[in-house]
Image (cartoon, helix red, strand yellow):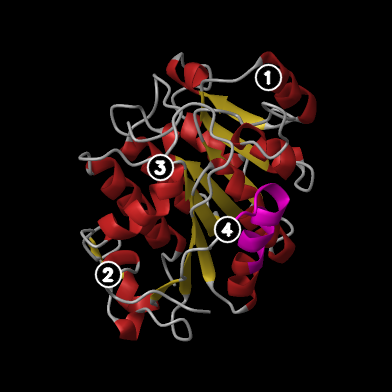
């Protein structure tokens, strides 16, 4: 698999710790955008992540390590979708993620619109058939179709629960959906932690503990950056008020650690860079590196 050089790879790290054959981690760039319904620009998200990641510090005081030097991080050349869309585009992502998994890599997929997540989730469930999916988002993305497309970013988890037991899907931060999605959640037993319910204390003060308890020991994370409040993350296609802070996301990962849940892969999607506004880009890059530190704790 061809990988990017130091000048362009994730974290801008040296060749000796970014070669494919010696790295334990693989970054897959999926700059795919075909079904955005409000703001556009997610096609530029992966490139913005790679560029801004060069300014992320390697050392993490919480873990007392420089993970990139301990494990190595290879960054695959961005997928060229050409004129491929929908199922054909997803097949390109699936093939690259599966290739990385077959080679024993921990795979991170960076989008692009949320549609892309179906492919890495499918590849991971084939390797980890008992896994849960933890879905961070402002939207539940459970419409059977949207604007005439079953491959819409608003339908990604409707596609996922066609091959994943819905009771193994946990969603957090949801604050925008249609009534049909709400009914589906109730009917299929999806574990959805709405933002309003969290804010109103419906789950109690220990809502994070309750959320994490719904997860299997092995967890795939799909992280739409519009989970964050627009004050934290304005650079996304469909921002929603009453969102969450960066540390609130980390609190969930820390509780996963406490309960012995293992992150086995993840994707981060829906960054739509804004010219002249760099902090959303580096926040996303920092999130990816932080999640990797959680995934590799003790390894």
- Indicate which label's residue lies in the foreground, 3 or 1: 3
Q: Tag 4's secondary structure?
A: loop
Residue under pointer 4: 81
| Whether residue 131 can be seen here | no
- Indicate which label's residue lies in the foreground, 4 or 3: 4
Q: Residue at x 49, y 47 (%)?
A: 112
Crowding near the residue tagged with mark 3, few <14, some 14–19, many ≥20 C-alpha atoms within 10 Å: many
Q: CA distance from mark 1 to mark 2?
A: 43 Å
- Indicate which label's residue lies in the foreground, 2 or 4: 4
Q: Position of residue 71 (x, y in %)?
A: 39, 76
Q: Earlier in the sequence, mark 1 or mark 2?
A: 2
Question: Which range is magenta?
Answer: 82-95
Q: CA distance from mark 4 to mark 1?
A: 33 Å
Residue under pointer 3: 271
Name the image quarter holding the C terminus: bottom left
Q: Are marks 1 and 2 in contact (CB under 8 Å)?
A: no
Q: Within the magenta stretch, is there residue 83?
A: yes
Residue under pointer 1: 182
Q: Which mark is residue 211?
A: none
Residue under pointer 2: 12
Q: Earlier in the sequence, mark 4 or mark 1?
A: 4
């Amino acid at each position: 698999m061809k990988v990017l050089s130091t000048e362009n790879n994730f974290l801008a790290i040296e060749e000796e710790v970014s070669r494919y054959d010696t790295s334990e981690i693989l970054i897959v760039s999926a700059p795919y955008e075909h079904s955005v319904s409000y703001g556009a620009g997610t096609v530029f998200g992966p490139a913005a992540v790679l560029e801004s990641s060069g300014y992320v510090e390697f050392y993490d005081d919480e873990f007392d390590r420089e993970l990139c030097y301990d494990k190595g991080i290879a960054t695959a050349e961005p997928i060229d979708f050409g004129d491929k869309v929908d199922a054909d585009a997803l097949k390109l992502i699936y093939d690259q993620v599966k290739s990385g998994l077959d080679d024993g890599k921990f795979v991170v997929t960076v989008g692009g619109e949320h549609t892309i997540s179906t492919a890495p989730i499918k590849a991971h469930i084939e390797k980890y058939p008992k896994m849960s999916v933890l879905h961070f988002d402002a939207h539940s993305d459970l419409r059977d179709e949207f604007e005439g497309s079953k491959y819409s970013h608003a339908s990604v988890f409707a596609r996922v629960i066609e091959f994943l037991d819905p009771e193994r899907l946990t969603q957090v931060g949801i604050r925008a959906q249609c009534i049909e999605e709400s009914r589906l959640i109730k009917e299929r037993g999806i574990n959805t932690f709405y933002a309003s319910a969290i804010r109103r204390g419906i789950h109690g003060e220990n809502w994070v503990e309750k959320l994490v308890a719904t997860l299997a020991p092995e967890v795939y994370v799909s992280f739409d950056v519009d989970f964050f409040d627009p004050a934290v993350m304005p650079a996304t296609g469909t921002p929603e008020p009453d969102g969450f802070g960066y540390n609130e996301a980390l609190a969930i990962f820390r509780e996963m650690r406490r309960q012995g849940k293992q992150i086995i892969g993840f994707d981060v999607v829906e960054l739509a860079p804004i010219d002249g506004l760099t902090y959303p880009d580096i926040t996303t890059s920092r999130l990816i590196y932080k999640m990797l530190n959680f995934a590799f704790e003790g390894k």
